[in-house]
Image: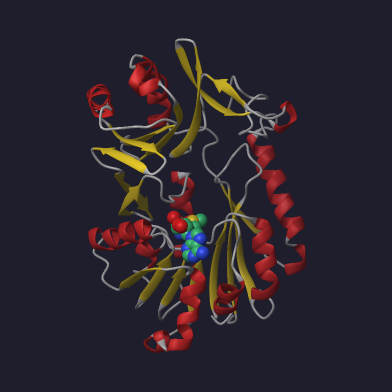
Amino acid sequence: MKCDSFGKCGSCVLWQMPYDEQLKMKTQKLKDMFKEFNIPDIEVICDKDEHFRARAEFRVWHEENRSYYAMRKRKEEGRGVIPINECKIVDKAIYNVMTPLLREIEKSENLRFKLYEIHFLSNSKGELVVTLIYHKKVDENIADDVKKLKEKFPNIDFVIRKKGRKFVFEKNYLIEELKVKGKTYKYKIIENTFTQPNREINKKMISWVLDKSENLSGDLVELYCGNGNFTIPLSEKFNKVVATEINPESIEAATFNAEINNRKNISFMAMSAAEFSELKKSGFFNGYDLKNVLIDPPRAGLDDKSRKFVNEFENIIYISCNPETLKRDLHTLAKNRKIKAFAFFDQFPYTNHMECGVILTKGE
Ligand SMILES: C[S@@+](CC[C@H](N)C(=O)[O-])C[C@H]1O[C@@H](n2cnc3c(N)ncnc32)[C@H](O)[C@@H]1O
């Protein structure tokens, strides 16, 4: 990938390294980090190194009559942001509207004044939700300007945000269709809730999890389920599934997603992983065969209560976006389990971020 902002923008810190080298470097880093755990060969799962992000957030920089997207500077260049002309890591749907959208916004003082950030969310059909975030009092008067914008960009729905206030034109979500192992799954993806940023890698992650759970049976417990990204396809492999997540809006999407995919064996619950782990004491799980658990926590990894709960399962599927906390958690979870598979999913080319998948089992 080539980009005008390489060396200036703080996002693509590995801008000088060819993509193949990045994969080698990151795989070696993981090998070194996890060598004490006797892991099998790392499966390296990658895809395109440009136009891969289905969601992105940009600051907006205003200069006289022009506005620019802006990114955090490289650390070495100090604090602050730099204006950028384009961004090649976002998918084509986002890439193609970024500049024309900003040129249109520039024409309306009401839309442009104190516009602070623009967030993009896209689906594979090229539909978008664009969120305009303001540092000013936003009232209903903005509606006429947004409606005009929407006439120019019929494939975009707009959300206007200002601390505490939100206006939606016409909806704040998209329906995404992901084809995994020959089957299409539908997902409602809601603006400002978690969705996997790299669509193609996400499909490969779901596929990997399905393959690795081929021989598992019984029921499944899932913590940090988001909108049911893994839950919906995995539920076809298990008898009953109970899946939880802290964000009620994600649980609303997950419940909707179970319906549109005709999955009837899943119970979703909106609560923290720690609270859910405490339910064991109340006998909540008596009707469940507690053998399999899938976890996909945020960067902080597992809290103490959730780690203790997860450690009671025979089979653990751990998806991690932070190798540091994964390593910390494996010190407990791998103590009396075998690590059967270890994958590195390159969700974030040109950055040092690494997403991993680990399969742990007490069985063979
Ligand atoms: C890395 S995302 C994974 C979501 C989902 N598995 C997916 O693939 O889209 C982590 C999720 O954990 C949720 N979360 C964050 N802290 C949590 C907590 N303490 N308890 C339960 N869920 C939490 C977030 O809202 C987010 O949806």
Q: Residue at x 25, y 21 (%)?
A: 152
79 displayed left or right of 295: right
14 displayed left or right of 191: right
Q: Residue at x 37, y 70 (%)?
A: 269
184 displayed left or right of 347: left
Query: Where 364 sits versus 41, above or below?
Result: below
Res 326 → quadrant:
bottom right
Give percent across and percent down for residue 239.
34, 78
Q: Residue at x 59, y 67 (%)?
A: 302
- Residues 324 and 130: in front is 130
- Residues 58 and 2: in front is 58
Res 219 → quadrant:
bottom left
Q: Which residue is the extreme one toward the top?
A: 65
60 displayed left or right of 33: left
The quadrant in which the C terminus is found is bottom right
- Residues 321 and 181: in front is 321
- Residues 109 and 307: in front is 109
Give percent across and percent down for residue 142.
28, 27
Residue 206 is at least partly visible in this image: no
The quadrant in which the N terminus is found is top right
Res 139 → quadrant:
top left
